[in-house]
Image (tube, rainbow, N blue to C red):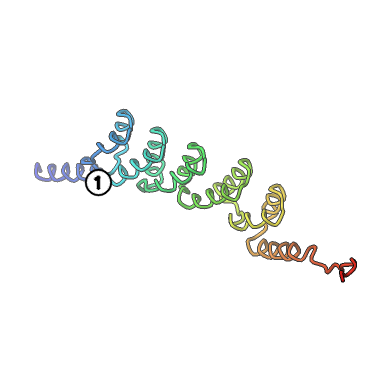
Amino acid sequence: MKVHLTIFLMCGFYAAGCGQHPMTDYRPLGAAGMGSSTVEDLKTLNTSDAEVIQLVHLKQGGITDDTCVALVRAAHANQHPFNSADWTVNLKNARFKEQQIVEFAQADKLDSIGGEAVTLKLVGLSEPTVTTLLQRRLRGQTTLDSAQIGRLKNTGLTENQILQQIDQGITDEVADKEIKARESARNHANTGFVRNRGRIAR
């Protein structure tokens, strides 16, 4: 009976420790400038060595301690390790607020939305328009590809006109046809032949 009890306890201990990282080396975080209290918070989140490397990258990219913890917590809540340091720093460099980045992570769309978000900023859209488009993506609503949005803007459509078309359910295929039509009309504008009525010099 004692043997069975011992085996049971050993199995329970092993199950409780499954997936934990008691040997993680947290020293690189302190060297990267992370506060000791933050490191303790990360220990309670059972942060792995691979995640520590990601977090060092975040600190080098100027991400605050609170956001580092929030990103690891969001990743674990979504049942996977945090491995999105590159996209996080890219979004930070594109002047997204850290709270926005955390929202992407909480929705488990940090990787999938990162490229689109950066492109929307590069296109030159205003902050309210970028926020509206990204909120649509976070809610799972259909919207145009960021490249198509940029092309529509380049043909002369205003941001409000683009948002109206998105609200009406325009697809990438329909947008592509409209873009080509508007580009063709623009390229042919003011190309009529004008006769020179001046006198010919002798």
Quarter occupied by the N terminus? top left
Outermost front residue: 202
Q: How many marks?
A: 1
- Quarter of the picture holding the C terminus: bottom right
| Percent x, y of residue 91 | 48, 44
Looking at the image, residue 55 lies above or below residue 181: above
Q: Please report the residue visible at 37 percent of the width from the left and 38 percent of the height from the top.
A: 59
Label 1 sits on residue: 18
Determine the image quadrant of residue 22: top left
Residue 78 placement (x, y as % from top left): 41, 46
Q: Residue furthest top?
A: 37
Give the image quarter of residue 33.
top left
Q: Nearer the viewer, residue 114 or 150?
A: 150
In x, y percent, where is residue 193?
83, 69
Would you say 187 lies left or right of 192 here? Answer: left
Q: Position of residue 188 (x, y in %)?
A: 76, 66
Q: Does residue 39 appear to the left or right of 182 in the view shown?
A: left
- Mark 1 residue type: Cys
Residue at 69%, 52% in the rendered image: 162
In-front residue for pair 117/164: 117
* Nearest to the observer: residue 163 or residue 168: 163
Q: Residues within 10 Å of mark 1 (few under 14, many from 20)?
A: few
